[in-house]
Image: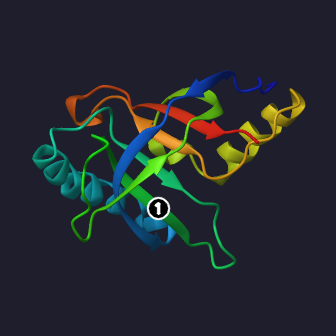
Amino acid sequence: MLKTALEFEVVDLPEETFAFVVRRVAPAEVGEFIRGALARVAEFATCCGGPQGPPMAITTAPDEYGSLVVEAGWPVASDAVPAAPVEVRTLPPVRALRHLHAGPYEELGGGFYAELFAAAHERGLTPASAPRERYLNDPGTGEEPLTEILWPLS
């Protein structure tokens, strides 16, 4: 069976204020950490005027031990003030590749990102920094997970 290249488009992302909790985790702990972090940051966001978009995570490539640094949270109003353990930072405007993934989160591992990187490179694009995953629906409602991958380009 031939594998088809991942489809994506290039988009311009505006500046965005991101409230998040960060932790270095083993790959097996990513899902549990993200769920807990999103719940914690949702409470923070509610006190700051409410979330300004879907929940998201920014995850680094694995280190030599396989651990990843994961920032998970919500976009918030630009005047949000951090309150430990929730941090706030401004994500600058950036050009990024955008891929819409329908399916289990478990499919979004290193192999998926290597394939997406290769597909971008074939089109003369270079993904840089950590990709962002926006979670567009709640799979707890029985829907198939829908994740928007936004990977900044250099």
Please tell me in which quadrant of the rendered image residue 32 appears.
bottom left
Residue positioned most to the front: 79
Position of residue 117 relative to residue 136, above or below, is: below
Q: Residues within 10 Å of mark 1 (few under 14, many from 20)?
A: many
The C terminus sits in image quarter: top right
Rendered residue at 48%/41% (across/down): 133
- Residue 117: x and y in percent read 76, 41
Q: Secondary structure at mark 1?
A: strand
Rendered residue at 81%/40% (across/down): 126
Total labels drawn: 1
The N terminus sits in image quarter: top right
- Residue 137: x and y in percent read 31, 29
Which of the colour schemes (rainbow, by chain, secondary structure, one colour) is used? Answer: rainbow
> Which one is nearer the viewer's eye here, 87 or 41?
87
Q: Amino acid at mark 1?
A: Val
Residue positioned most to the left: 47
> Which one is nearer the viewer's eye here, 85 or 100?
85
Rendered residue at 69%/77% (across/down): 64
Please tell me in which quadrant of the rendered image residue 4 appears.
top right
Q: In this rendering, would 83 be left or right of 60?
A: left
Please tell me in which quadrant of the rendered image residue 23 appears.
bottom left
Q: In this rendering, would 99 be left or right of 43?
A: right
- Residue 40: x and y in percent read 20, 58
Q: In this rendering, would 105 be left or right of 136?
A: right
- The residue where tag 1 is placed is 70
Rendered residue at 29%/34% (across/down): 139
